Image: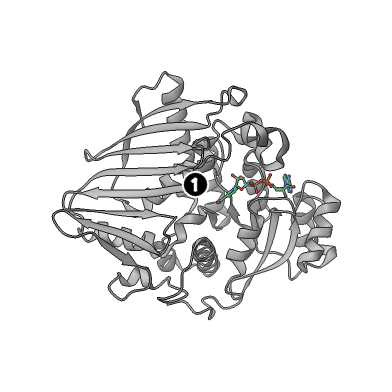
Amino acid sequence: MLNGERKIARPLRWAMVGGGRTANVGYKHRQGAMRDNTAFQLVAGAFDIDAARGKDFGTNLGVDPDRCYPDYQTMFREEAKRPDGIEVVTVATPNSTHYEITKAALNAGLHVICEKPLFFEVAQGEEIKALAEARNKIVGVTYGFSGSQLMLQMREMVANGDLGEIRMVELQYTHGFNATDVGDKISEGQKWRVDPKIAGPSFVLGDLSTHTFYMSELICPQLKVRQVLCDRQSFIPSRAPLEDNAYVLIRYENGAVGRLWASSVNAGCMNGHRIRIIGSKASIEFSDHQPNELLYEVQGQPIQKMIRAMPYLYDACNADERLGALHAEGLIESWANIYLKFAIAIDAKNRGDEATLKNLVYPDIDAGIEGIRWVQNCVKSANAGGVWVDFN
Ligand code: NAI
């Protein structure tokens, strides 16, 4: 069980690019990174595309005004001159900027934690992976939902054969908040999501399904995607060619099959993030409406509801427990677990501790690259008229 005690020798000196006052996701990064107060310390930032607003915001967060920079280039240059300069930076800006900021950060000698979708092309991911290796740095990806310890319970149950042979993988991440185009016109965070120059080759596939796809890989690491067939729609025509709804069929190399539904036009749906893994003996299901529970359904037996923090869960699951049974938890806990693992990875990298890195389960650069590969192949399939394409 986690109780906030330090896991690394001292907190890492941390900065953010983006995540400013108006940002959707910035606060989640700060809450996740600093939940334990022993892993990350926010000491600098280029928080906003609007430099004055960013400085005011950073100062209000308690960051030294001299270390609230007008842009990331200035921050990387000036921080490199300080003996107590930043060691790691989070990139929480719109998608089109991730690649150049990550590259600049690595070249400035920094570890990087970057938002999803990581980049637009697998080749960019491979290039950055090689650069990170050459610089001996970690690149982590904030698939923020994946840190929930119940994901590790599902992973252990699959690995231990509790479900039998895995046959089907059912994935859904949908909401209805873009059922009309109102937000496309007025929301800072929504306008760019439907602009291919900034969002990249997809809207909901990149924005939503990269999370769920990674979680399926985390739970079922033995399943390798062989082919995907994607059909995508722009129900709000002005969003074309970007989709606001997508259905993807998946064929795995071992004969298992899967299905993913990503949508931001599922009208009335507040948040539908659901993962169901079906084996030859039993199924498990997670829905973030009930983030404290896992359904375990053994064929021919009464349905069981497994509850977070209980001793019957696997040790790997309870090792990431923060509150104990009786207390409900949710997304911030998941983020905090992800951030803690980024810190442990960075610390291990700094110390050349390959054994720790090898055993650490977290969304690393490969997970980011797989997210890009996923989007690329789905888009390729959809654009070819919804045909099976080899997953490569
Ligand atoms: P947003 O548009 O709400 O906020 C972007 C922030 O970055 C703003 O503060 C803006 O001023 C700043 N910014 C933009 N360009 C910048 C630059 N060049 N330098 C410094 N700051 C800059 O966007 P949102 O929704 O916060 O998304 C940001 C990223 O996070 C996207 O890649 C998105 O896909 C991802 N995201 C991830 C989530 C998750 O659960 N992991 C949830 C929401 C978004």
Which residue is disc 1 drawn over? 368
Determine whether 270 is above or below 387 in the image.
below
Secondary element at image label 1: helix
Q: Which colour scheme is used?
A: one colour
**x and y percentages locating residue 172 in the rendered image:** 41, 43
Which residue is depicted at the point 38% across and 33% down? 248
Is residue 170 left or right of 69 when viewed as pictured? left
Residue 392, can we see it?
no
Which residue is depicted at the point 65% across and 30% down? 197
Is residue 276 left or right of 352 when viewed as pictured? left
**x and y percentages locating residue 153 in the rendered image:** 33, 63
Name the residue at the front extreme: 268
Which residue is depicted at the point 85% across and 64% down? 66
Name the residue at the left extreme: 300
**x and y percentages locating residue 31 in the rendered image:** 61, 65
Dot 1 amino acid type: Gly
Residue 1, can we see it?
yes
In the rendered image, the quadrant that contains the C terminus is: top left
In the rendered image, the quadrant that contains the N terminus is: bottom left
